[in-house]
Amino acid sequence: MFGKSFPFYNSVAGFYPQSTDSRRPPGTGYTSKVRVRDRYHIVGFISSGTYGRVYKAIGKNGQKGEFAIKKFKPDKEGEVVQYTGLSQSAIREMALCSELDHANVVQLAEIILEDKCIFMVFEYTEHDLLQIIHHHTQPQRHAIPAAMVKSILFQLLNGLLYLHTNWVLHRDLKPANILVTSSGAIRIGDLGLARLFYKPLNSLFSGDKVVVTIWYRAPELLMGSRHYTPAVDLWAVGCIFAELLSLRPIFKGEEAKMDSKKTVPFQRNQMMKIMEIMGLPTKETWPGIVSMPEYAQLQSLAVSRAPGHFSRSSNLEGWYQSCLKNNGYFANASAGTPGADGYDLLARLLEYDPTKRITAQEALEHPYFRSGGAISANCFEGFEGKYPHRRVTQDDNDIRSGSLPGTKRSGLPDDTLMGRAAKRLKE
Amino acid sequence: MAANYWASTQRRHWLFTREKLAEIRESFKEKDKVAHSQFPLPDQRLLNIYFSQQLIKLGKRMSTRQQALATAQVYVKRFYTKNEIRHTNPYLVVTTAFYLACKMEECPQHIRFVVGEARGLWPEFIAPDVSKLGECEFSLISEMSSQLIVHHPYRTLSELQPELSLTSDEVALAWSVINDHYLTDLPLLYPPHVIAVMAIIVAVVFKPSQTSFHGSAAPLAGAMRDGGLNILAALSDKNGSGPPARIQRLVAWLAESEIDIKAVIECTQELVSLYEIWEQYSEKHCKELLGRMVKTKNLDK
């Protein structure tokens, strides 16, 4: 990868702010006291999203180490960039990252506000779960060792427990947001959608209409709940656990887009994908469901299918057993096995009723983590393979990137694209 | 952290001693003696009242939640521990603090609306161009090192209500004492729970019926000085006999809790001093001096 002598550190177009301050009379206007270019060499481009872009950088002038710098793009108004007020999600992410401090949450080095741009400087992480899962499907499927899955899940839950005990909901957990350092430490990243949930002033529902990438979205949200609880994050952890074992998203639905009236549609297809494995939610197993806004929609969906299409009981155990079998998880195999305890934890994470769903604290105390050997804080411990480094490119052409949702990573398809590619392969 | 005051940036970076605060303000004076002699401003305590009142006015126009207003109050105070007032347009700082606090407290207002309402209040000091506010937002966030999460005493008050079986009148009075503490340096000097306990003591010792709290603060200040402080002094003396049962219960609770009683007493004194200096406060005078400063120095441009 790029060493300190990497010669093109300044070649990534568009990263550094153009210096325009000099024309200003002193004493008026805002000028940053710290300048990005004085502290970091930009070595390349990592990814982009609707918020802006992420770059890889190395420190200079005494600043040691590698960094990932998230540059929020300013809203463009014609040729001249104007201050238009920062987005609420940028404000949230800045405030939360400045406050949070935990080994399993992404670590912020500093925030620089310079020339109408925000630069959030994070520690650099070499991997993320999306990339790791992807690697295990190449060139052919080979399971992620059971011990590694356990370490990942433990660290993820540990970070989540920290967030939840500090009243922070992540709201957008997905493999691409779970970062992994080269020494195997898990860091929960991308707090752009995270919010404080104690005594919320407005219903957490108002404001941002769409939260959590659809495949990881909890059923109560799909059913139109306006009340977010930490349980939404635990559903996402369940989905990630399943994906680590099967190397495919467990509930890969298609998102129904918002209509022109900007009303949130019922995510029929996603709910169906869940019910195909988890069975029909009933008022016996989930008493709160009858008062959910989309309950009528759910019933009409159930009726529209042939009787018996959706089982009334969960088929998760069948899914789990065939997943273990197909991926070679056996007690005597090299990958090891998550075993019966793994199934029990998964079932508790993928519990329909959010009030019964296991909490981060309870999950950490689950027998799955207590059986077997010690859990390593390095998820790669004992793993022979090698993961490719994060791809960093020099090309930073300003492709108008607002059209696709979520984070797009160069060299690595994001969830949406991977979904499409997989579909194409099947066809 | 967000829910944990003890690990918060508020406790680690935004809690000052009186001496430190005085030192900071003195250093501003040292650095720009010319501006200080050219633009004399009212006493810091009077300025505190003025800025808070302006924020409240802005908040009223936009029917804001108390929490956002309180956060904005703290932002203004934090900002002026890093910046000399005479180098800023205080009306723009107040407006920006409000705009930023609304986003942070999850009740965002559109930037154009905020600028419009601020112009309604201070047309001569706020430019119609929203980019001024956007720019000031950068400055505010940068000076506060993006440490935007603020802990307020209101939460402690609601947590303690059942524990101390406070009546709704007492809670209401304690609530307005907390509101008043934003007119002072107290949010920079003491942790929120100390403020909350102080407010509860004031509310329990002085029944709401005894005084109309807002407007005429003088009788309350007198009462607090004469009677209240004696009771507070008795708090540290567990064998003290005298105060009525209701207050004794509070005393017993305080003794059991690990609250810094000395700090609580100091807070009460600060509040007494607020009510006293309030008698000298003239909004017009503050407005004139600040207006002359902003206009002469072209700080509104």
Image (cartoon, coloured by chain):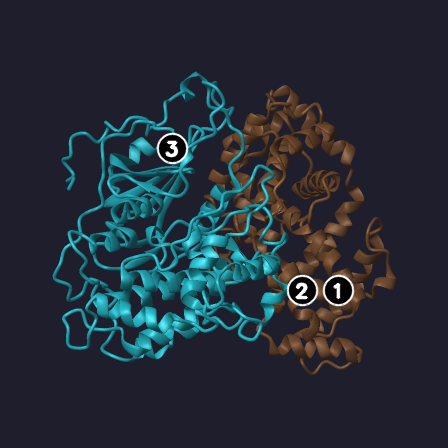
Dot 2 and dot 1 residues touching (CB under 8 Å): yes
Q: Secondary structure at mark 3?
A: helix
The C terminus of chain B sits in image quarter: top right
Give percent across and percent down for residue A349.
Answer: 42, 69
- Kindly identify the amino acid type of the residue bearing the numbered disc 1: Val
Q: Are marks 2 and 1 on the same chain?
A: yes
Would you name the residue on which mark 1 appears? Answer: B171
Q: Nearer the viewer, residue B168 or A228?
A: A228
Where residue A60 sits in the image (x, y, percent)?
24, 37
Q: Chain A is which colour?
A: cyan
Which mark is drawn over residue A193?
Answer: none
Q: Residues within 10 Å of mark 3 (few under 14, many from 20)?
A: some
Which callout, 2 or 3, points to the residue nearer the camera?
3
Which chain identifier belongs to the brown chain? Answer: B
Label 3 and label 1 in one chain? no
Q: Residue at x 19, y 77 (%)?
A: A331
- Look at 40% across and 66% down and name the residue there: A277
